[in-house]
Amino acid sequence: MQGSPIVIVGGGIAGLACAVRLAEAGRPCLVLERADRVGGLLRSETLDGVVFDYGPHVLFLDVPGVGENFLRQTLTGRPVIRHPFAFAVAAGGRMWQFPNHLDFLRYPLRYKIEAVRAALKRRGAPPPEPISAELELSEKCGPGLYDLLFRDLFAKKALTPPAALHHHWLARVDRTIDNAKEPFVRRGKAAAVIAALSRLRQRYWYPAGGLGDVPALLARRIEAAGGEIVTGVTDIALTRENGRITTITADGRAITPAHVVWTAPLDTLNAALGSDAPALPSVTMRLVMLTYNRSERTPRPFVYTYHPDPAMQANRVYYPESIFRERGPADREGLCLEINLEDAAEPEAKPWSGPWPTWPGWDCTRCPPFGLPGWSPCPRPCPSIRWITRRSWLPPPPRCGR
Ligand SMILES: Cc1cc2nc3c(=O)[nH]c(=O)nc-3n(C[C@H](O)[C@H](O)[C@H](O)COP(=O)(O)OP(=O)(O)OC[C@H]3O[C@@H](n4cnc5c(N)ncnc54)[C@H](O)[C@@H]3O)c2cc1C
């Protein structure tokens, strides 16, 4: 391809999706990725034969949409796994299933009444911005259910009081490129019922090799269309003239870009521009992937379960078994725990594996997986459990006390 390339910084799904569209439209493009492989948060890791995803576990290709259509096209002709999709919130001694709203029929009467009241409540004009996640959700499901399922969960996930969380956090509504806010839209009752019913039939599409297949497929398409991908880029500098980026220097290689598309975190853009803008607030998410022996396969109906209980450090447990089932190893199962902490300054550490650790304040009877319904009692000390974390967020593992 001839001419100045469009330079895309960051080889996550956003950068790769952008590059593949450009390359296949015949535009010269160059992807610069800091890591040694593309994918960013969309990638898979295999531990003891169990495939784990780092980021999304679910690509909803059943529903129409730009992203869904793009991913469906990417996976065309590839083996995909399709199952009904469900997750659950573990609270009040039961699993609250989503999006299976038939579970509503089994709700305790008090919550049924509240939820029906909330659904039938007549509402006037939306309240003035900012509208909190708390307001939006407690209006939708009623205050009792909100308190039980979501209040503590949001605080654990976002490390912010839910009353201070903007409702865009909940709906994952982004601002536009001009930083305009999406309006707060209240759906009509009929639309809400239709959306709920359609979710009952929702299935996820999952590449048979793990979500890591997606960036690998996109990278091949980009290169086949003449685009270039450079990984392991450690140093990017931008030169600006009259408000335009005229040169981008990547590890000493100077490039005159036609355009620059920045999909890496905004803070890295500010640093490359030499801006003294304050760092954006962030949460450090620790993903702990562990595997353990099993004598028999237990069905895992939920892709993940959320855990609002403040006494439990993990806010979410992801079950690769729910997706792979008989495709995974027969005698070994894996879990991935998501734990959000504020100490973002802690340096990245090498993956570490060893016996299951304990740490101060950890109550093993509540410990995932053993504190969850249907799990065997804690077999400590348990040499069959291996775990891996991308950060050294735990103290060195002492022996279990029991
Ligand atoms: C545990 C978890 C669960 C999730 N679950 C879901 C889900 O179920 N459904 C869903 O839709 N989404 C989910 N997400 C969100 C989803 O993973 C992300 O929104 C998406 O992968 C982000 O893609 P991206 O390309 O924007 O960013 P990233 O994937 O972060 O890509 C940015 C890339 O830029 C690179 N980079 C950073 N700095 C530089 C630099 N200076 N120079 C060059 N490159 C740089 C990084 O290495 C990275 O590859 C989940 C995320 C997590 C962590």
Image (cartoon, helix red, strand yellow):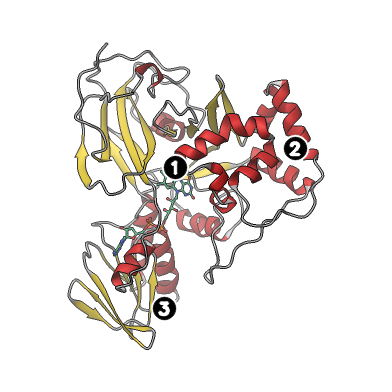
Quadrant showing the N terminus: bottom left
In 3D space, how far apart are the residues under numbered discs 3 and 1 (Cα atoms)? 45 Å
* Contact check, label 3 and label 2, Cβ < 8 Å: no
Instruction: Pick whichever of labels 2 and 1 is earlier in the sequence.
Output: 2
Residue lying at the far top of the rendered structure: 402
Query: What residue sits right under mark 1 in the picture?
Result: 159
Query: Neighbour class for label 1 at 10 Å: few (<14), some, many (≥20)?
Result: some
**Residue at x-position 37% and y-position 51%:** 41
Foreground label between 3 and 2: 2
Instruction: Pick whichever of labels 3 and 2 is earlier in the sequence.
Output: 3
Residue at disc 1, secondary structure: loop
Q: Classify residue 238 as left or right of residue 170.
A: left
Taking depth in this image into account, of 349 and 15 the one nearest to the observer is 349
Q: Classify residue 200 as left or right of residue 57.
A: right
Type of residue at label 2? Ala
Query: What residue sits right under mark 2 in the picture?
Result: 118
**Residue at x-position 77% and y-position 50%:** 188
Query: What residue sits right under mark 3 in the picture?
Result: 26
| Residue 255 visible (yes or no) | yes
In 3D space, how far apart are the residues under numbered discs 2 and 1 (Cα atoms)? 27 Å
Query: Neighbour class for label 2 at 10 Å: few (<14), some, many (≥20)?
Result: some
Residue 18 has which mark? none
| Residue 86 visible (yes or no) | no
Residue 114 position in % (x across, y down): 73, 30
Q: Is residue 309 above or below residue 214?
A: above
**Residue at x-position 47% and y-position 23%:** 299
Residue lying at the far bottom of the rendered structure: 242
Taking depth in this image into account, of 150 and 320 the one nearest to the observer is 150
Q: Quadrant of residue 46?
A: top left
In 3D space, how far apart are the residues under numbered discs 3 and 2 (Cα atoms)? 52 Å
* Contact check, label 2 and label 1, Cβ < 8 Å: no
Question: Where's ligand 1: which quadrant?
Answer: bottom left
